[in-house]
Each structure stands twice: as C-alpha cells, then as structure tokens.
C-alpha cells in the first residue's frame, strides 16, 4: 500500500511531458493526465458542438486517441498542445461528417479552475450567455480560436500548433472574430 501511495504522489507532482513518456508502460500516468485534461478538453469541445452528448462523445474519442497513440507523443511541444490538437482534429472530423450550422452555447460548462483568468471572470458575469451566443454565430474557424484563446487561455503559439495554422493566421482569425463580435454586440445595443 505504501508503494502505490508514493507512486500516486509522484505522478501528481510530475510534469505533463514526464507523464506522457510513461503512458505506454503505466496506465496510472495516463489516468493522471486524464484527470488533468478531462475538464479543459471537454469545455473546448463543448464550445464547438451543439449539445452535451456530442461533446461527451468527441471528448471520449480524444482520450481514446490519446492513449492509443501515446507512443507517438514527441516532447517537442507541450502535452497540452498535443491533446488539444487531437481535440481539434476530432472536432474537424465531426464537422466534416455532418453539416453543421450555428452552434448554440446556452449552457457552457463551468470551469473547475478556482482562479479563472480575468477574461473568464468577465465572461461569467451577466453578459456571458449573450457573448457566447454571439460567439456561436461566428464561422467555425473563428469560433475555435476564440474558444482556445479565451476559454482555455492558450497563447497564439499554442493555438497555432493545435490548429495547424500559422501564428499570423491565428492572429487574423482572432482579430476578425473580435471585429464581428464588436459589430454584433453594438448592433444589439442600438
């Protein structure tokens, strides 16, 4: 019993990349990564899908792919970027499998982080629902980068790696999304 407690403590203190290196030999390492990333990945996927059931299915696919291809993780980038890249690819596959239109985001999952970023705090205020309904009206590429930037608090470099777009393309998508949101929100005020 003492050995497993020590192992669990060591896993809890290990970096994501160190755990990823152990996943092919130690399921507990994957369980630790799963615990760390389930909520953030689900929140990102949910922001891109019309309902909880679809988001849960896609999230399950993400983690299935993560464990089945654990041996392909190269520590050239962060594990966080790698898992979100898998999520991006699964969402892309889902979108191409069925025609999608505007995604309703009336119920955005709550964050498990007790100290949300200032952007996340602003979104949780009274206007949160309105803002995310407007985000849901954005084209899929813009909606995705907005969700990665403001829900997951990823930087442009990480978003670039996840989406396979250049940093400049990510910045342009974010800029265009902000402009559309600003115009849309101004239109609602008038």
Image (cartoon, helix red, strand yellow):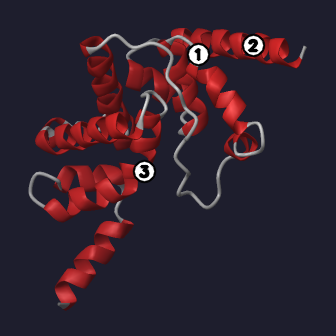
Q: Nearer the viewer, residue 156 or 117?
A: 117
Badge 1 or badge 2: first in the primary sequence = 1
The number of numbered badges drawn on the structure is: 3
Question: How many neighbours does mark 2 have within 10 angstroms: few (below 14), some (14-19), or many (20 or more)?
Answer: some
Q: Nearer the viewer, residue 45 or 37?
A: 45
C-alpha separation, residue under disc 1 versus residue under disc 3: 24 Å
User: In the figure, 17 relative to 169: above or below?
Assistant: below
Q: Is residue 126 visible?
A: yes
Cβ atoms under marks 1 and 2 closer than 8 Å: yes
Reading the image, the residue beneath label 1 is: 137
Between marks 1 and 3 in the image, the one whose residue lies nearer the viewer: 1
Badge 3 or badge 2: first in the primary sequence = 3
Reading the image, the residue beneath label 3 is: 39
Reading the image, the residue beneath label 2 is: 184
C-alpha separation, residue under disc 1 versus residue under disc 2: 10 Å
Question: How many neighbours does mark 3 have within 10 angstroms: few (below 14), some (14-19), or many (20 or more)?
Answer: some
Residue at point 55%, 32% (across, down): 105
**Mark 2, secondary structure of its residue:** helix
Q: Which mark is residue 63?
A: none
Residue at point 58%, 25% (across, down): 146
Outermost residue on the bottom side: it is 2
Residue at point 57%, 30% (across, down): 149
Residue 69 located left or right of residue 9: left
Quadrant containing the C terminus in the rendered view: top right
C-alpha separation, residue under disc 3 versus residue under disc 2: 30 Å
């Amino acid at each position: 019993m003492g050995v497993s407690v020590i192992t669990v403590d060591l896993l809890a203190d290990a970096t994501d990349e160190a755990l990823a290196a152990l996943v092919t030999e130690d399921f507990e390492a994957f369980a630790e990564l799963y615990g760390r990333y389930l909520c953030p990945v689900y929140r990102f996927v949910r922001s891109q899908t019309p309902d909880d059931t679809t988001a849960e299915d896609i999230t399950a696919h993400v983690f299935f792919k993560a464990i089945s291809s654990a041996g392909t993780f190269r520590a050239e980038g962060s594990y966080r970027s790698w898992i979100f890249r898998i999520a991006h690819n699964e969402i892309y596959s889902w979108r191409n499998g069925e025609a999608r239109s505007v995604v309703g985001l009336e119920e955005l999952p709550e964050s498990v982080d007790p100290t949300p970023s200032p952007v996340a705090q602003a979104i949780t205020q009274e206007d949160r629902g309105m803002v995310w309904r407007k985000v849901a009206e954005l084209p899929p590429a813009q909606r995705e980068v907005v969700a990665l930037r403001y829900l997951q608090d990823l930087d442009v470099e990480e978003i670039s790696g996840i989406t396979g777009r250049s940093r400049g393309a990510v910045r342009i998508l974010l800029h265009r999304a902000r402009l559309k949101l600003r115009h849309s929100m101004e239109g609602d005020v008038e």
